[in-house]
Amino acid sequence: MITDTITWQHFEQTDIRVGTIIEAFDFPEARKPAYKLTVDLGPLGIKKSSAQITKLYSKEELIGKQVLCVTNLGKKQIGKYISEVLVTGFEDEDKNIVLAQPAAKVPNGSKLI
């Protein structure tokens, strides 16, 4: 199913950048199983996020992975935790989240164009 069409200008307003996960912690207070992530976005700084990716990824294997993050959604409070960016992904056939990642290493903070 394709959603409503948006303008090119509208798409350009979404700031999607690559960052490297530098820390991953359990998030036992979350309603659904999740991790607290710390992501290095280069010139944009170090940002926090929460991600429901516990089924397919261990905390240890997340360290060093580059991921695509939406950086201009504003902060979102999840319990007592403040998420600063949205780490993106896709649902697989079992509804588990698969991280969206660049095919090759790129500098942290690089913008999706």
Image (cartoon, rainbow, N blue to C red):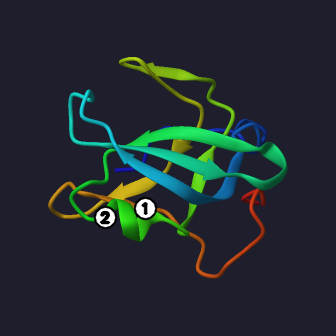
- Depth check: 52 or 79 in front? 79
How crowded pointer 2 is (Cα within 10 Å; few <14, some 14-19, many 20+) is rated as: some
Q: Position of residue 10 (x, y in %)?
A: 72, 36
Residue type at mark 1 is Leu
From the viewer's perspective, is 42 left or right of 54?
A: right
Please report the residue visible at 65 percent of the width from the left and 58 percent of the height from the top: 19
**Quadrant in the picture for residue 75:** top right
Please report the residue visible at 58 percent of the width from the left and 80 percent of the height from the top: 103
Secondary structure of the residue carrying numbered label 1: strand
From the image, which quarter does the C terminus lie in?
A: bottom right
- Depth check: 29 or 6 in front? 29
Q: Where is residue 86 in the image (x, y as percent from the top left)?
A: 53, 40
Q: Position of residue 34 (x, y in %)?
A: 30, 43
- Depth check: 92 or 108 in front? 108
How crowded pointer 1 is (Cα within 10 Å; few <14, some 14-19, many 20+) is rated as: some
Secondary structure of the residue carrying numbered label 2: loop
What whole-number distance in Å separates the C-alpha atoms at marks 2 and 1? 9 Å
**Quadrant in the picture for residue 106:** bottom right
Q: Do the residues labelled 2 and 1 touch (CB within 8 Å)?
A: yes
Find disc 2 in the rendering and name its residue. Answer: 57
**Quadrant in the picture for residue 27:** top left
Residue type at mark 2 is Tyr
From the viewer's perspective, is 111 left or right of 78?
A: right
Tell me the tag on residue 99.
Answer: 1
Please report the residue visible at 70 percent of the width from the left and 53 percent of the height from the top: 17
Furthest residue toward left: 94
Q: Position of residue 52 (x, y in %)?
A: 31, 45
Which label lies toward us, 2 or 1? 2
From the viewer's perspective, is 93 left or right of 72?
A: left
